[in-house]
Image (cartoon, rainbow, N blue to C red):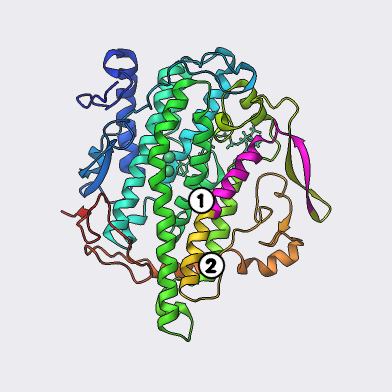
């Protein structure tokens, strides 16, 4: 189906023919717009931003670039094309035709997965809403806003499923998406990492590198779902997600590059004296965001996850490419466990360990960026290596929640943790230093001192292109 842009809500789900659904979504729209004004990017209503908008779901040619005022952004509902004769790929229904409607007996579980996924999307917009005031360049400001409008669209994707397939309780859940808020003491967002602040651009780049990557892995396992509309929604969301992770990876690379340049320019003295972010501080932010993102995969052993799998609702990463029975009847999988003051690996039923397996896949993917950043450091002739902390470090969920660990994974006492944690996680002083660097740079092509220019612009445009027009 082609995308209908005549509609108030652009879509390729046939909203034009479905009066009930169209009216439900049109009724939700004003609340969404109010939410965007109150909780979206501050002071952004009158900016013309050079944004991409989805115009088709074809690989290659799906995006159209042009100046848009964000309140007028065409948030729409786009599903990847159906796969002919798609079957449930795993669990007890493996081989049966994929469901086009919600299976009644799995309604509560499916709704919960969709609500949890949907809740993160507006949460991230709320977390990032003040960053525009301190953008390091127009290029970066444009990228921030691109990420924000697409996270808004991801909320639309989940709200479409709630309205389209869940009736009244779906409508209520869609309303609640606009009522919970990041960090709100009374009505917080569902998952922990989405109630933390994103107070500066270093945190933003870390978030888009590590936390949007959790999004990639969660969406990929929901894309395996036997509930076909969820699968198709997630498949299209994944095409947008790639840019978010690019923003994080390239943002950190540019910060690393600037730090190295400053260190080589001024052979002596603290890098901070030259207004750049020193590598040890970068490592601390990395430790924080990586450990918080690891928590987003849930516990190592999870009956929730086992049930989702057996029911055919949420699969493993690239489920269909895995060569096994896709039922996990007798399979085992190694998971960490704390015994005394050591972490040991034990074999657990693979079915209850699917969260851990997804986390393992995620960790491998995270490591790739570090390889690139470390190459920049090595090429600059500097003796320093960024490392992922071990997974016991700074965890709030799962086997390591009750213990303290060094980044190298050695379990330590509360006393040692208190004495040393300022060396591992951003201290108040580190945060104040990073904050002190945050000042807006809005001249086209100019960069803040603490970040190098990107390798190239967006949509084939030069770096000094006017990615935003102010009134
Ligand atoms: N915080 O059985 P367990 C994205 C709860 S990011 C708070 O291990 P399960 C994005 C859990 O709910 C992707 N609570 O949990 C990125 C359970 O509660 P109950 C978001 C937590 O269900 C950047 C209990 O602890 N998508 O898209 O197997 C920008 C036992 O845990 C947490 C999804 O997450 C936590 N971290 O796994 C924008 C996909 N972890 O049952 C967007 C949908 C666990 O005792 N969600 N709990 O009341 C899921 O698949 C699962 O809910 C989780 C948790 C993987 C998150
Ligand atoms: Fe998203
Ligand atoms: Fe994202």
For the residues carrying marks 1 and 2, which lies nearer the camera in this image? 1
- Expressed as whole percent of the image width and height from the top left, the position of residue 275 reads 40, 75
- Expressed as whole percent of the image width and height from the top left, the position of residue 169 reads 48, 20
Looking at the rendering, the stretch of residues picked out in magenta corresponds to 343-367
Q: What residue sits 49% from the left and 30% below the top?
A: 223
Residue farthest front in this picture: 323
Residue farthest left in this picture: 471
Q: Is residue 227 left or right of residue 324?
A: left
- Asked if the magenta segment contains residue 361, the reply would be yes
Q: Is mark 1 within 8 Å of ligand 1?
A: no
**In the figure, residue 356 lies in which quadrant?**
top right
What residue sits right under mark 2 in the picture?
428
User: Marks 1/2: CA distance?
Assistant: 22 Å
What residue sits right under mark 1 in the picture?
210
- Expressed as whole percent of the image width and height from the top left, the position of residue 136 reads 33, 63
Q: Is residue 337 above or below residue 424?
A: above
């Amino acid at each position: 189906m082609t995308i209908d842009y005549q509609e108030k809500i652009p879509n390729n789900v046939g909203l034009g023919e479905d009066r009930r659904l169209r009216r439900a979504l049109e009724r939700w729209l004003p609340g969404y717009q109010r939410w965007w004004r109150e909780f979206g990017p501050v002071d952004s209503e009158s900016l013309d931003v050079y944004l991409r908008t989805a115009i088709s779901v074809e690989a290659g040619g799906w995006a159209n670039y042009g100046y848009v005022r964000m309140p007028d952004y065409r948030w729409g509902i786009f599903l990847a094309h159906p796969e002919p004769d798609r079957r449930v790929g795993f669990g007890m229904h493996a081989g049966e035709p994929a469901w086009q409607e919600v299976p009644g007996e799995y309604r509560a579980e499916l709704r919960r997965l969709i609500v949890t996924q949907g809740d993160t999307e507006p949460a991230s917009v709320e977390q990032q809403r003040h960053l525009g005031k301190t953008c390091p360049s127009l290029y970066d400001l444009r990228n921030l806003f691109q990420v924000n409008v697409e996270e808004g669209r991801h909320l639309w994707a989940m709200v479409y499923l709630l309205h389209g397939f869940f009736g009244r309780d779906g409508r209520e859940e869609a309303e609640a998406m606009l009522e919970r808020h990041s960090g709100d003491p009374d009505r917080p967002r569902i998952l922990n990492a989405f109630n933390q602040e994103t107070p500066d651009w270093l945190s933003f780049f870390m978030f888009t590198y590590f936390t949007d990557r959790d999004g990639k892995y969660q969406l990929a396992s929901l894309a395996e779902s036997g509930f076909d509309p969820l699968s198709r929604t997630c498949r299209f969301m994944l095409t947008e997600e790639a840019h978010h992770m690019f923003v994080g990876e390239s943002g950190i690379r540019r910060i690393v590059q600037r730090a190295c340049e400053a260190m080589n320019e001024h052979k002596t003295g603290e890098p901070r004296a030259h207004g750049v972010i020193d590598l040890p501080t970068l490592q601390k932010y990395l430790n924080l965001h990586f450990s918080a993102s690891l928590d987003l995969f849930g516990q190592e052993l999870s009956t929730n996850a086992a049930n989702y799998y057996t029911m055919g609702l949420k699969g493993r990463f690239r489920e269909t490419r895995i060569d096994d029975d896709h039922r996990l009847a007798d399979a085992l999988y190694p998971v960490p466990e704390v015994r005394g003051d050591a972490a040991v690996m034990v074999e657990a039923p693979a079915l209850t360990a699917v969260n851990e397996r997804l986390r393992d896949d995620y960790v491998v993917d995270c490591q790739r960026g570090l390889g690139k950043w470390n190459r920049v450091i090595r090429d600059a002739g500097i003796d320093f290596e960024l490392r992922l902390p071990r997974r016991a470090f700074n965890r709030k969920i799962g086997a390591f929640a009750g213990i303290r660990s060094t980044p190298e994974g050695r379990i330590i006492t509360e006393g040692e943790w208190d004495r040393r944690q300022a060396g591992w996680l951003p201290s108040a002083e580190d945060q104040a230093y990073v904050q002190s660097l945050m000042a807006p740079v809005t001249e086209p092509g100019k960069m803040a001192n603490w970040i190098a220019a990107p390798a190239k612009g967006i949509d084939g445009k030069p770096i000094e292109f006017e990615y935003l027009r102010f009134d």
